[in-house]
Image: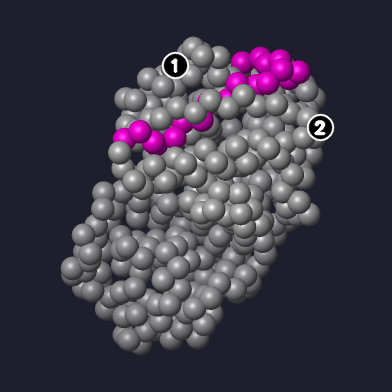
Amino acid sequence: MFAVLPKPRNLLLRLAALASALWLASCDTGGIGGTGPRINTDAPVPVALLVPGGGGNSGDEFLARGLRQAAEMAIADLQGVKIDLRVYNTGGDPAQAAAVAAQAVNDGAKIILGPVFAEAANAAGRAVAAAGINVLSFSNNTDIAGGNVFVLGPTFPNTANRLVSYAARVGKKRIMVVNEQTGAGEAGARAIVAAIARNGALSAGNFSYPFSQEGVINAIPAIAQRAKSGEVDAIFMTSDTSGALSYLTQLLPEHGVDRALVQFIGLTRWDIPPSTLALPGVQGGWFALPDPGLNGQFAARYQAAFNEPPHPISGLAYDGIAAIGALVRAGHADALTTAALTQGAGFVGVNGIFRLLSDGTNERGLAVAEVRNNQVIVIDPAPRSFGGAGF
């Protein structure tokens, strides 16, 4: 059997200087308008940060601290913008998240950053919707996106589109989808199928398996048979290290799948945890990740400032403050409205370029990496602007 599988918590886990990365790719935001509060850009802007602290879970406390410290780091980097950051603990609980979100608005917050987990973010968004306050959550679950709730985390559709686009461009157009029969696995498969259609690639079949050791092992022969048909250029897997990734990448070649002909692609980060990179089966595989250069600079600065490494998603808090700071700096009273947040030029943060979409989801500029000799090698750099390769 697999190791005991934890219940998913919907945390589907500058260019020259970081300070310069805080501003809009284009600062022309005149006449933005839209739904949301009006602000005084000459005074400190009240921003609420909702973190999963206060519940007694050590992992959540580390995450909460990481998000707060990253947000404080971003505020210190702002030029000409003052942010009044107010931190609220949700305990990782939806009811508490709704309560503190309402409290934050009563305290004067003009926008909310967080929470992390999807149920909590959804509850917070509902609690402040009537007040017209936007919520920039750290979730990557697109099911909660829309209305006044945005997701800042890397989404399955964004990741799938980046990888399928690259695969098609380099000749790996016939793509087979392999997913586990879980909520996340099915959502990931849908994202890949949509990306295949969007990028002019070809569907080479879909296979799913029960989320168990027996389930994936029993599915291997059929997957391998299809992969050896001569009609498959790539196998796009939704699984991660806690699931079937090691089984798929090891057993498919043992069943005759030629890695020289069939490219393995992963929807999840194959460098988290780092031990995944040592798996023999992932060597030569592709996955997507934020701009490693910018992210590495952030990690080094964070380590130096706080004497500990950042949590893997701490940078989302920095990015949220970056976007807010860029909009406020433009000097418009409607800087935090929906129309302003979704302006097309986007923003640049410690994870690279990103922009918020009108449906509450996001687009991020991701790099495509290959695992070679247990290391991450970027084979297609993250785009530095929207349009062109990578979008």
Residue type at mark 1: give it.
Gln
Q: Which residue is mark 2?
A: 28
Identify the main secondary structure in magenta: loop
Q: Which residue is mark 1?
A: 103
* Scheme by which the image is coloured: one colour
Viewer-closest of 362 and 294: 294
Q: Residue furthest front?
A: 307
Quadrant of the image occupied by residue 207: bottom left
- Where in the figure is residue 59, as x and y percent of width and height? 36, 48
Look at the image and tell me whether residue 158 can be seen. no
Q: Which element is circle 1 on?
A: helix
Residue type at mark 2: give it.
Asp
98 relative to 227, above or below? above
Viewer-closest of 65 and 197: 65
Q: Which residues are magenta?
A: 37-55
Q: Which element is circle 2 on?
A: loop
Viewer-closest of 196 and 327: 327
Quadrant of the image occupied by residue 101: top left
The mark lying in front, picked from 2 and 1, is: 1
- Where in the figure is residue 354, as x and y percent of width and height? 64, 45
